[in-house]
Amino acid sequence: DFYANFDGDPLVKIPWVRRDLSGPQVLVMEWIDGIRCTDVEAIKASGLDLPAFIRTGGSFNMRLFYNGTARAEEGPPTILRGINRAVNAFLKWSLGSDGYQAWLLGVQEMPKGGSRLSLDFSSLLGPLFFCWLLQLLLPPMLNQLVYEKEKRLRNMMKMHGLGDAAYWAIQYCWFFVINFTFTWILIGFGSLINLSFFRLTSYSFQFVFYLLWINCLLAFTFLLSTLFRSSKTAVVVGFLYVFGTGL
């Protein structure tokens, strides 16, 4: 009925009969009353009539169906446990006792080709080192800005006619060139050692992303430089910030 109702429906995977066997092909009895079937002498000594005992069991013909609707793209599910229960039910019905069971000792995996353990370090450790590397230039940039303020070098520049707008524009251009060069060295090295993060991401997308990132980093550095009067304190706080945000 199941096959007739859903035959031709592309959304339902119709299970098919794996095998249709009977007799000794399906049911193999290994133990009878605690005696292994291959131990002929022990069977004779116990007085059991093994051929007559087996003939009383009749025939075993089983068809197993399973719902593969949610597993259409995968292999068959684990059905050996169900087969084992069906065999035990047949033994109970055929022999009229619960003392006989076909033990499912285990399931062994099918042989397969050798494989190596492959670890993608860019996925495991990438976020940590990525955050560290992209912010690695923040402490030295912060140190330079605070050092010029600490040693009053900025006032000396003003005395020589360098205005604030020109000063910040020069600092921005210099820091931008350094960060832009450092970023593309990082991208080139990552692509050279075949890191998937750099290799699988479009370079045009990376260009836009790092361009925006560099501008955000420079703006944040200029903001932090206004909070410190000591360059040493600024460097320590800068490195702590870099390592803390990476973790």
Image (spheres, rainbow, N blue to C red):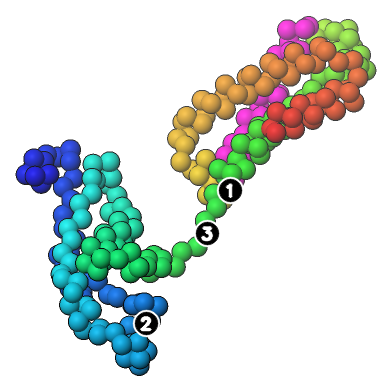
56 or 211, which is in the foreground? 56
Q: Sequence order check: which comes first, mark 2 or mark 1? A: 2
Image quarter of residue 62? bottom left
178 or 9, which is in the foreground? 9
Residue for point 74% across, 30% down: 244
Disc 2 designates what residue?
36
Disc 1 designates what residue?
121
Disc 3 designates what residue?
117
Q: Amino acid at mark 1?
A: Phe
Quote the CA–CA distance across marks 2 and 1: 54 Å
Q: Amino acid at mark 2?
A: Arg
In the rendered image, is residue 137 in sight?
Answer: no
Q: Is residue 162 magenta?
A: no
Is 222 displayed left or right of 55 in the figure? right
Is 174 displayed left or right of 94 in the figure? right
Residue for point 65% across, 33% down: 131
Q: Sequence order check: which comes first, mark 3 or mark 2? A: 2
